[in-house]
Amino acid sequence: MTVSISPISDALGAEANGVDLTRPLTQAEQDVLQQAVVENLVLVIRNQHLNPEQYLASVRLFGDTMPQHLTEMLMKDHPEIAVLDSRNAGADADGTVYTTGSRDWHTDHTNHAKPPKFTALYAITLPKSGGGDTGFANMRKAFDNLPPSRQAELSALQTINKIEDKAYVSAADKKKFGVLQSHPLIRTHPETGRKAIYIHPGKVAKIEGMSEEDSKGFVDNLMDQIIQPDVTYRHKWRIGDFVIWDNRAVVHLAHRDYDPTEGRVMQRVLVQGEAPR
Ligand code: OGA
Ligand code: MN
């Protein structure tokens, strides 16, 4: 088996070919995959046939798994895996039901002191009438695209992050994961040394030193500025896709353009990261 890596868009992302994750990989092959995700920020491995143990073993090639606060979606025998099923969508505190995944561009779980460096999704079921793509945006490129004065302005800022008020997060987990966390808005990648915009707008309680209202306007404006076609890639899922992305330099978006009753099922695992700097 020879692993090869090919880009899937000009913005970010690569596909690994010649990989069967049910078989043991050589150290060299593991190195290729690990390097591919950090360089390309999104790594797609198509056409995999994985039971939960094999899926977890595959994610562990990239690091240690970490707990998720999607309390009601955890797989019984494998609580490291959350099953995102569009038919069991959670509701907000106000009762509004949204399909799983997030409604806006975001990086994952910024409410942690050490948020996940990678998120993996494995496609089990897709809506039969189509839709349910995932968007990815390269926050390294988005940062590089900004004029130096804006880069300097953003580099001075810290976001204060909270857990969202969703009914699917239990009261105990809200408490456990609910401590406010301060993170740099511009993050330096620990492996590549490259700077990237690091943000989960839904979890930003405020920007340090700004009012909540000003923070919201600031963040909305920033997202409008940075999410541009030249930094984005839209992944059209096929059953058996194993996709892993680098949360330290990518934001993503679940397109909610499908009929949730048809069933979109993804198995999700998080890989432990480090404190953002
Ligand atoms: C996630 C997420 C996107 C999707 O799992 O963190 O945002 O398309 N998912 O399911
Ligand atoms: Mn997400």
Image: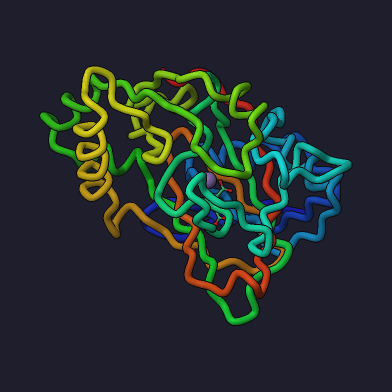
Residue 32 visible in the current orientation: no
x then y, percent, for residue 250 = 43, 42
* Residue 182 to residue 204: above or below: above
The colour scheme applied to this rendered structure is rainbow
Q: Residue at x 42, y 27 (%)?
A: 161
x then y, percent, for residue 133 = 51, 65
Quarter of the image with the C terminus in it: top left
* Residue 134 to residue 168: above or below: below
Instruction: Give the number of callouts.
Output: 0
Q: Nearer the viewer, residue 6 or 106?
A: 106
Q: Nearer the viewer, residue 263 or 114?
A: 263
Horizontal relation, residue 122 to residue 148: left or right: right
Residue 50 visible in the current orientation: yes
Q: Nearer the viewer, residue 201 or 55?
A: 201
Q: Residue at x 67, y 64 (%)?
A: 87
Q: Residue at x 37, y 39 (%)?
A: 201
In the displayed image of the protein, which residue is found farthest to the front? Answer: 94
Quarter of the image with the N terminus in it: bottom right
Q: Nearer the viewer, residue 225 or 235?
A: 225
Q: Quadrant of residue 63?
A: top right
Q: Residue at x 41, y 40 (%)?
A: 202
* Residue 87 to residue 71: above or below: below
x then y, percent, for residue 13 = 48, 52
In the displayed image of the protein, which residue is found farthest to the bottom? Answer: 129
Q: Quadrant of residue 152?
A: top left
x then y, percent, for residue 84 = 67, 54
Horizontal relation, residue 227 to residue 123: left or right: left
